[in-house]
Image (cartoon, grey):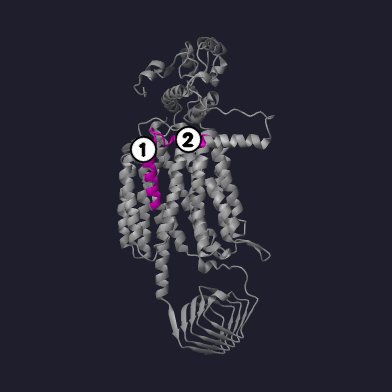
Amino acid sequence: DGYRNTNQVSDDYRYQDGNYEAPNDGYYRGGDEPGQEEDAQSDVTEGHDEDDEVYEGEYQGIPHPDDIKEKQKKRGPAVDDEYRDRADLMAERMEDEEQLAHQYENIIEECGHGRFQWTLFFVLGLALMADGVEVFVVGFVLPSAEKDMCLSSSNKGMLGLIVYLGMMVGAVLLGGLADKLGRKQCLIISLAINAAFAFLSSFVQGYGFFLFCRLISGLGIGGTLPIVFAYFSEFLSREKRGEHLSWLCMFWMIGGIYASAMAWSIIPHYGWGFSMGTKYHFHSWRVFVLVCALPCIASLVALKFMPESPRFLLEIGKHDEAWMILKQVHDTNMRAKGEPERVFTVSYIKTPKQVDEFIEIQSSTGTWYQRWLVRITTTLKQVWDNVLYCLTAQYRMNTLMLAVVWFTMALSYYGLIVWFPDMIRYFQDEAYESRVKIFDEEEVSHFTFNFTLENQIHRNGEYRNDKFIGMKFKEVRFEDSLFEDCYFEDVRSSETFFENCTIISTVFYNTDLYEHKFINCRLINSTFMKEKEGCHIDFEEDNDFLIYLVSFLGSLSVLPGNIISALLMDKIGRIKMIGGSMLISAVCCFFLFFGNSESAMIGWQCLFCGASIAAWNALDVITVELYPTDKRATAFGILNGLCKFGAILGNSIFSSFVGITKVVPILLASSALVGGGLLALRLPETREQVLM
């Protein structure tokens, strides 16, 4: 009958022939009252006999008034909760939750898996897709934003990490709130914050405001991952949970593909924008930022039509609302299967004993902000209590082991996915430098340069009465050279420097050859007039299409791993999936020693991403299943926040070794994966476990 063999459950709660039987103790039970079995049998037919009169409130999960009076009489002598020890109340609540877990599993099986779950699957998939997009956005816009906002190397690094910092805080905060305020409500808040600040970030011009908007945008999207998996799992039966949560993970991959495709098709089109005067510029990379907010907005709109998790509502004692939602799930699925006459047979559902309750503050008490302050501090204290609960003796070992596995996985994965593009750029730079042209002791006079000079070094040259008009310098160096009576007008430059040069009677008009580009130079009677203001973008030259292609292929390569993990998740179990995937990924890391070209690095990146995705999917599933309903999103948020901290460390550590050595990143990633994979094998298997 699907129940654990405990005396308490078997004595107080019996499930026979599809019907629930329970004692009259004042709590909601899953059993039918005497006489209801015949009514249920009658209801499954097309019509109802006039003689079968059923209390209409029964189909709304509301007890009959006569039953309520009878139960109140029976429990009259009971001791009020306020005089009972808290430990006794908690013990009673634990017993109630045990019974609810098994009854809820049977109810979900009765509701079936059909149209409702698939609708929710796509709605929550869009939210997960928005999370995947957020990870890639900053990396794609950095080359353009760097020129548009005149970013230094340190500013670029901060912009790359700030999103992970926001996601780390958002995962813990919003995940914890989801266990107190509800899955749907907190997910709406999370998506609304992300959509609003992502939209705003595309219009702000200054670096500081852009950084702030991306931080808050990351905070909002950080809450989606823990909430989405907790939310969807509570509509799935035990047999479907592992597989369909794994299918849901595919939307993160779709988010990466979407971001790569949009970057590839939008950012290079410099004309897709507008300017307002000389101060406000809306370039195509800002259009890309706007487009990346669309999955979040779509999910936000669709979520308004979805119900709250009934499992959460039962946990906080809202029986009638939960019953109506479960009936909606049942009826939606039955109509889709062509069986609209099937009746939802559950009348009463067990609700756990309520220990902590919100007490609404009267409007006459204090000022409005004092009342809100009390509500906020009370809620945050309850969230903090949930965080501490995950470290109690019952869950401490599982939490610590999961924390290590999440951290090692994030350190290796996020470190390497940043390291791969950096290594490809490094190989490109090496190849570019190998093609440099060197000119020694050249003498040029009375010549007009009106074309691009690229990847050149000019040493000991002499330039007299020459004109440089409407031209570009790209990766050009002048060393120990003489410029006399020359004229520079409307010149743009990139990575161009003058070292130890002597410049006499030369005019620079409307150029971006600023002071810092003249290193140890002597300027005699030279004039700088009307320097170019701001930063200037040359998309055709500064943006590398190969980086978009690398991210696109990396995202697409996880498709086989997603399919395999979804099909095998419930067959081989979560633990073997995590351990096996992490160990295979560690082996893939060693092959990186042979990646000495761009194509080799792209190939090994695809192999690593494809092998590691199964571990991510299994981690999401087991984290959902190891914790009870009132702590599930909190625990997931803590672990996902730790994951983002590992991502920050991985990005910082791995990128610092680009161009220096491959040994440290490869050994660090592989050893972390081996350690995490072996530790994961000690976690408890959960595929046969009902959601507590």
Q: Residue 134: percent from the left, percent from the top?
A: 51, 51
Q: Is residue 105 above or below residue 391?
A: above
Q: Amino acid at mark 2?
A: Asn
The residue that disc 1 covers is 397
Other-residue count near label 1 (Cα within 10 Å), few / some / many at <14 / 14–19 / ≥20 = some
The image quadrant of residue 90 is top left
Marks 1/2: CA–CA distance: 16 Å
Tell me the chief SS of the magenta region. Answer: helix
Q: Is residue 456 above or below residue 616?
A: below
The residue that disc 2 covers is 386
Other-residue count near label 2 (Cα within 10 Å), few / some / many at <14 / 14–19 / ≥20 = many
- Residue at 45% x, 53% y: name it: 648
Is 70 displayed left or right of 621 in the figure? right
Q: In this rendered view, identify the residue nearer to me: 77 or 316.
A: 77
Q: Residue 372: percent from the left, percent from the top?
A: 63, 36
Q: Residue 39: percent from the left, percent from the top?
A: 49, 14
Q: Amino acid at mark 1?
A: Met
Residue 240 can be seen, yes or no: yes
